[in-house]
Amino acid sequence: MKIQSSISTTAAVDVKPSSSIPEKVTNKSVKQSEKSTKFAGKERVAKWFAQAGVYPAYSNRPTQALDDKIVAKNTLKERRKFANLERILGKALDFCLDETQSDDLDPDWFFSFVNMAEDVYSPQMQEVWGKIFAVESSQPGSFSLKTLQTLKQLTQKDALTFRQAVNLASRRKGETTPKLLLGYYRKKSIWSFLQPRPEHQLNLAHFFLSYPDLLALMDLGLIHHSEIESGELANDQITEWRVAGHSVNFTPKYRGLTLVYFKFTTTGAELSKLINSQKQDAYVNALKNILAPAFEIN
């Protein structure tokens, strides 16, 4: 019994912390760390509001009457808007294209552009707006006011999602509106209605464009809300496509074949012109594999 008691005592000693720092000191350090983190959070919040000309009551700034604070805030706001326009002008001058039309800009379009562009603060989006103006000044009518209003709503996440959609987009030769090709559908014969419909479509989530991403683009008015089937393709007729940076020819093997796709809206098509797309080899190979049973592919 004495031996057991000794072992029990030893075990109790072994599990105690080796540090000799008192518990009160440890708690004090934790509280100081929490206080420091909270202070950093307040500083971050105050820093953002300072950019809008608003400061916390405890700041060391000279006391001002409310009217003076409002004047100072509005002055800072107007200065930032003016700086935004200057940066966008600089980007537009960098992108300027050769004149292709003699038509002048629509003044209503121009001043609507200015009113929207002055509230664009992100450097990345300022570059986009500069490019839009460069294209519009060279080719009036390239971008509608509706497109500008849609662009104004885009967050950086939305812009990245749209970029990936453009990367995966396809255009049939002679057409200007991009499409997201998914696969094909073959009209059933009278004897095949009892058979399950085979799956001949890609899952775009495998290519970094998930269903929630598609819904977001639909809500923004960049692609149409439902899948579309092309008209029935003529048997043995070759159609030329530009698919995600690759040139591909499709020739139907059978009658009753239609391609299935999501179609960009007019706004989406206009904004897609601003993006330099990148080849998507994995998507093109997967699309070829899914079309291969019904199409000759070159």
Image: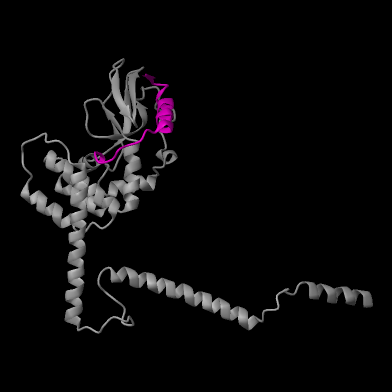
Q: Position of residue 219 (x, y in %)?
A: 28, 49
Way the structure is coloured: one colour
Against 247, is 138 above or below? below
Q: How many marks?
A: 0
- In the image, 119 versus 262, the foreground residue is 119
Q: Is residue 203 left or right of residue 263?
A: right
Rendered image quadrant of residue 139: top left
> Residues in magenta?
272-298
Quadrant where the C terminus lies? Answer: top left
The residue sitting at 40% across, 38% down in the picture is 204
**Image coords of residue 1 (percent x, y):** 94, 77
76 vs 297, left or right, is left
Measured along the vertical axis of the image, is residue 55 above or below residue 243? below
Residue 1 visible in this rendered orientation of the protein: no
Say which residue appears at 12% left-offset and 53% top-offset: 112
Q: Does the magenta segment cover residue 274?
A: yes
Q: Is residue 150 above or below residue 28?
A: above
Front residue of 249/235: it is 249
